[in-house]
């Protein structure tokens, strides 16, 4: 890795996260327990439902991190192991995209998922790590309940407008509900159970326990009887599934490891989920769940067969790649991106969305479609543009399609990802560019360099409050200050090399009537401008090493611990030997036992001293 490069620092120990996780999921369980009180909002006009404690509507189980889970989820276990209990050791709240994907996979892409999702948390540079530290607030649960109700209305076609088309409605319902109820105007426990088990297994990413099924069948029966409509009752059971902790959180459980007595391993369903979300950013499909159930996922050949099958689906692999890079590249910053309309009249939400999509298209095309060297994404001039981006890049758009391939000429200054409008607009101020912000963010994202924030008493007025001269000249105030120079000499050069691009990504050679100087020296190398910077990033071994680190952390959902260091180093060497091909890297990580290792919680503070 480059000088000063190191993995992102951990800010919280795993034991602390697990304690928070236990209380977080337990609180969600209590919140879910009152969901029965909301059942009355799902009945037909003029009717009411009083939650029946005997039916379990207020008794929903919420696994906590220390909770035992019914052993029937592990699959292919010995009779002795069948009596063992599984322990949940980690949880991750699913993302909005993962929620939408699950609904589309189970019920079709026409189902709309509308509503506000809980805010995400970025830790150690990744939202995937922060997902293990977030819970769901009371207000957030109400939002999830509202989303679930709207989804259930669409799936079972129970909105008033739809009730007027009974024949079409029944045809659509028959595609979702594989059994016909004995009576459409009453309860049918057997048919409801079949529905709950079928969709519950996909939503929970494991088979439901008998108790979990019984709770939802009873809920469906109560709703059907009081509404005189089987499908209205079934809707309540679906809402119950969609608001359960086991769906909204990815719960990872361990079981005794038969190959290593006294040790534990991820159970088959947790292993299947970890694999599927790494490669596809989606819940396990039926075939992967079957491999978890029959135990073949625990064999080398069985696991490799599943990896090969998942890797052979380019559309799903693209979705997985997009999700990873959207996380690694801080694309959630687009949600709050604004620009000064006086300084950048071309900026719009369409331009921002276009820039985001351009970057992802380039990555998919380069890394999956063409399967090329990852390092070349920093130097390639092959790209895509659409009609809204063309004015930003100052090129004509003469195509009929929504997107078109574009190879920029050398004089454009373009050099791979670093010069795309995405990073120029994200890592700038609303009204001007910022070499410091750009240098810090690009170094952190692509090199895993940690550059500390400025002291609280730094005076920025001479940099931000003046429009005289170039940004480079104004930054010399900090670069020549003994208290600031050490950080600015590390953070500023990459950004100064990109000063030919303004805060929107438009190419320029002059600022305030003066020629922009983009010659810099950084980490022992002298280079000129954005194309020189692209070559520096391409040739620095810390860049692919950082990608491997981030990919492993993203898949694990936690900051790698010291025991992961050797695994990451091996994968970095393998990445190099294989020609820096990202699909092969993902598959190789997924095939290694290290990726499924159960991380040991660190000893309590002071334990070592007491032992001594």
Image (cartoon, rainbow, N blue to C red):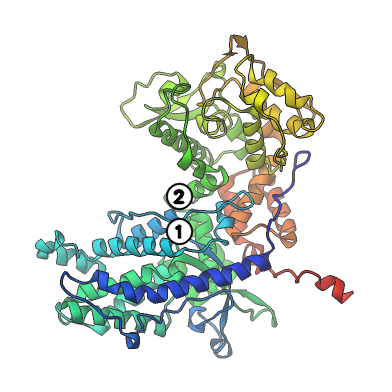
Q: Nearer the viewer, residue 534 or 456?
A: 456
Distance, label 1 to label 2, CA atoms, is 9 Å
State the residue in front, 137 or 307: 137
Of all residues, the one furthest to the right in this rendering is: 612
Query: Circle 2 sits on which residue?
Result: 319
Quick one: label 1, few (<14), some, or many (20+) residues within 10 Å? many
At 40% from the left edge and 34% from the top edge, which residue is drawn? 349
Q: Residue at x 74, y 47 (%)?
A: 6
Earlier in the chain: of badge 1 and badge 2, it is 1
Q: Residue 282 carries which label?
A: 1
- SS of the residue under disc 1: loop
Front one among 455 and 611:
455
Residue 433 at x, y percent in the picture? 57, 26
**Which image quadrant for residue 219?**
bottom left
Task: Judge by depth and name the residue closer to the eye, 447 or 139.
Answer: 139
Where residue 235 appears, x then y in whole percent? 26, 71
Screen quadrant of the N terminus: top right
**Residue 265 in the image: x percent, y percent?**
62, 74
Is the Cβ of the residue at disc 1 closer than 8 Å to that at disc 2?
yes
Label 2 element class: helix
> Residue 481, can we see it?
yes
- Judge from the rendering whether residue 67 lies leftward or rightward of residue 1; answer left or right: left
Please say if 463 is above or below 543. above
Q: Quadrant of residue 381?
A: top right
Q: In this view, does 589 lie to the left or right of 270?
A: right
Residue at 43%, 55% (x, y): give it: 96
């Amino acid at each position: 890795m480059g000088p000063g490069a190191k993995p992102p620092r951990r800010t919280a120990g795993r034991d602390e996260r697990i304690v928070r996780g236990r209380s977080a999921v337990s609180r969600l369980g209590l919140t879910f327990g009152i969901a029965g009180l909301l059942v009355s909002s799902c009945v037909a006009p003029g009717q009411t439902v009083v939650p029946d404690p005997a039916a379990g509507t207020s008794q929903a189980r919420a696994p906590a991190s220390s909770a035992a889970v019914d052993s029937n989820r592990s699959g292919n276990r010995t009779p002795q192991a069948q009596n063992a209990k599984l322990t949940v050791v980690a949880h991750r709240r699913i993302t909005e995209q993962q929620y939408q994907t699950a609904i589309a996979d189970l019920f079709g892409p026409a189902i709309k998922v509308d509503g506000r999702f809980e805010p995400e948390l970025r830790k150690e540079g990744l939202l995937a790590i922060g997902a293990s530290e977030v819970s769901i607030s009371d207000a957030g649960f109400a939002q999830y309940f509202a989303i679930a109700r709207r989804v259930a209305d669409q799936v079972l076609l129970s909105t008033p407008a739809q009730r007027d088309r009974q024949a079409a409605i029944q045809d659509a319902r028959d595609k979702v509900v594989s059994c016909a109820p004995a009576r459409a105007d009453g309860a049918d426990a057997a048919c409801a159970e079949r529905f709950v088990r079928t969709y519950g297994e996909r939503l929970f990413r494991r088979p439901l326990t008998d108790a979990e099924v019984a709770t939802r069948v009873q809920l469906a029966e109560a709703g059907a009887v009081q509404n005189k409509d089987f499908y209205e009752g079934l809707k309540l059971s679906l809402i119950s599934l969609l608001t359960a902790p086991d769906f909204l959180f990815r719960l990872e459980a361990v079981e005794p490891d038969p190959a290593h007595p006294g040790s534990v391993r991820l159970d088959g369903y947790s292993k299947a989920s970890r694999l599927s979300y790494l490669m596809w950013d989606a819940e396990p499909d039926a075939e992967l769940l079957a491999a978890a159930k029959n135990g073949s996922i625990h064999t080398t050949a069985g696991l490799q067969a599943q990896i090969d099958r998942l890797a052979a689906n380019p559309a799903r692999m693209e979705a997985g790649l997009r999700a990873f890079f959207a996380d690694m590249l801080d694309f959630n910053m687009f949600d709050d991106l604004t620009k000064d309309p006086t300084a950048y009249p071309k900026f719009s939400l369409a331009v921002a969305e276009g820039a985001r999509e351009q970057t992802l298209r380039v990555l998919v095309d380069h890394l999956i479609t063409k399967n090329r060297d990852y390092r070349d994404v920093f130097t390639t001039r092959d790209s895509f543009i659409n009609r809204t981006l063309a004015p930003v890049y100052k090129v004509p758009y003469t195509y009929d399609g929504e997107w078109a391939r574009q190879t920029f000429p050398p004089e454009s200054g373009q050099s791979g990802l670093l010069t795309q409008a995405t990073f120029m607009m994200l890592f700038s101020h609303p009204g001007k560019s910022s070499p410091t912000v750009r240098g810090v963010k690009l170094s952190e994202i692509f090199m895993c360099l940690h550059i500390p924030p400025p002291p609280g008493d730094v005076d920025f007025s001479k940099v931000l409050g003046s429009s005289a001269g170039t940004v480079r000249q104004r930054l010399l105030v900090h670069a020549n200050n003994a208290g600031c120079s050490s950080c600015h000499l590390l953070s500023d050069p990459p950004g100064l090399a990109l000063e030919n691009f303004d805060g929107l990504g438009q190419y320029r050679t002059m600022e305030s009537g003066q020629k922009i100087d983009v010659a810099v020296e950084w980490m022992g190398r002298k280079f000129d401008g954005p194309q020189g910077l692209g070559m520096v990033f391409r040739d620095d071994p810390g860049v692919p090493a950082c990608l491997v680190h981030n990919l492993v952390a993203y898949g694990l959902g936690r900051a790698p611990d010291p025991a992961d260091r050797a695994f990451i180093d091996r994968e970095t060497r393998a990445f190099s030997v294989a020609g820096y091909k990202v699909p092969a890297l993902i598959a190789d990580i997924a095939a290694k036992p290290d990726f499924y290792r159960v991380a040991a919680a660190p000893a309590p503070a002071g334990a070592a001293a007491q032992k001594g």
